[in-house]
Image: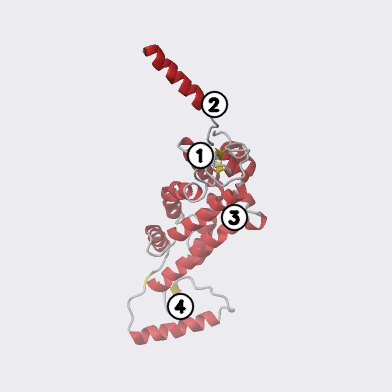
């Protein structure tokens, strides 16, 4: 009886092994390693962006050039980068197996799937290689989305930057004013702006004395971060040349194709 059981098992095993094998989706180490590789690659443009942001903060708020308030944004980025990138790349776009159903209902693997060049959007390495421009754009856009969240005025990272800048500024918060005083200050501020050659040079400090208004300062800080991070990101990655500085096409394709 045991002989017949073994024989039946071997027959089933051979039959299954002869069937067309499905194209494996990128799972486990494939997802983890590709996501981490992108984070490592983005370290260089991220440093460029943070350095630029620090320069903008120092210029706008008269800080010492050594002040590193953007470090709070860098720390916040490190906490969310992996989850944001993984979600943007895999569940949101590259996911699932690449098998296609034929006219008679059978599932077959398209040529090139799972490797090396799969012309079907799915979760295999070959699909990521074939649609690499899409993959590149996904990772660039994922960073823009991260920056947008980090600089929201009610976010912890924004408030940390605000505290850092205020601590480094040589000014104090203005005392609360009456409605009449506020109108007078607004007129004085408007006059100050009109004398600045039509350019907004205000740095969060009211011209009436050496102090700052919290609401105006916070809005000014948001504008600096919006310009210095979200908008500057296109220049850092070189959007005019298909994000050439955030592509790493040759290296990333080779890395992705390591996985089955």
* Mark-to-mark CA distance, 1 and 3: 32 Å
* Mark-to-mark CA distance, 4 and 3: 35 Å
Q: Residue at x 54, y 39 (%)?
A: 106
Secondary structure state at the residue bearing disc 3: helix
Q: Specify which label sits upstream in the sequence, 1 or 4.
A: 1
Which quadrant of the figure has residue 155? Answer: bottom left
Q: Quadrant of the N terminus?
A: top left
User: Which of the labelled discs sits on residue 207, or is there none?
Assistant: 4
The answer to whether 23 appears left or right of 112 in the picture is left
Q: Residue at x 58, y 53 (%)?
A: 137
* Mark-to-mark CA distance, 2 and 3: 51 Å
Q: Which residue is mark 3?
A: 236
Relative image position of residue 66 (x, y in whole percent): 49, 54
Relative image position of residue 255 (x, y in whole percent): 58, 37
Specify few, some or many for label 2: CA neighbours under 10 Å numbering under 14, 14-19, or 20 or more: few
Q: Specify which label sits upstream in the sequence, 1 or 3.
A: 1
* Mark-to-mark CA distance, 1 and 4: 61 Å
Callout 1 touching callout 3 (CB < 8 Å) = no
Secondary structure state at the residue bearing disc 2: loop
Q: Is residue 95 placed above or below 207 in the rendered structure?
A: above
Q: Specify which label sits upstream in the sequence, 2 or 3.
A: 2
Secondary structure state at the residue bearing disc 1: loop
Specify few, some or many for label 3: CA neighbours under 10 Å numbering under 14, 14-19, or 20 or more: some
Q: Which residue is mark 1?
A: 25
* Mark-to-mark CA distance, 1 and 2: 20 Å
The answer to which of 68 and 30 lies nearer the viewer is 30
Q: Between tags 1 and 3, which lies in front?
A: 1
Q: Which residue is mark 2?
A: 18
Q: Is residue 226 placed above or below 209 in the rendered structure?
A: above
| Residue 212 in view here | no
Q: Quadrant of the C terminus?
A: top right
């Amino acid at each position: 009886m045991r002989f017949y059981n073994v024989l039946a098992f071997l027959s089933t095993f051979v039959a299954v092994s002869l069937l067309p094998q499905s194209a494996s989706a990128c799972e486990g180490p494939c997802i983890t390693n590709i996501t981490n590789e992108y984070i490592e690659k983005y370290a260089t443009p991220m440093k460029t962006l943070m350095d630029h942001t620090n320069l903008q903060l120092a210029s706008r708020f008269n800080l010492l050039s050594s002040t590193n308030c953007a470090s709070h944004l860098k720390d916040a980025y490190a906490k969310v980068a992996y989850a944001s990138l993984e979600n943007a790349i895999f569940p949101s776009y590259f996911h699932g197996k690449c098998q296609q159903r034929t006219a008679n209902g059978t599932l077959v693997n398209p040529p090139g799937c799972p490797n090396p060049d799969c012309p079907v959007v799915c979760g295999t390495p070959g699909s990521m290689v074939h649609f690499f421009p899409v993959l590149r754009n996904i990772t660039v856009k994922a960073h823009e989305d991260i920056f947008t969240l980090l600089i929201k005025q009610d976010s912890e990272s924004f408030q940390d930057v605000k505290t850092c800048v205020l601590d480094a500024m040589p000014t104090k918060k203005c005392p609360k004013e009456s409605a009449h005083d506020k109108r007078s200050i607004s007129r004085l501020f408007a006059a100050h702006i009109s004398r600045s050659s039509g350019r907004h040079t205000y740095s969060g400090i009211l011209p009436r004395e050496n102090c700052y208004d919290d609401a105006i300062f916070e809005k000014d800080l948001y504008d600096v971060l919006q310009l210095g991070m979200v908008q500057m990101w296109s220049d850092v990655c070189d959007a005019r040349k298909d994000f050439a500085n955030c592509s790493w096409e040759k290296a990333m394709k080779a890395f992705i194709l390591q996985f089955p």
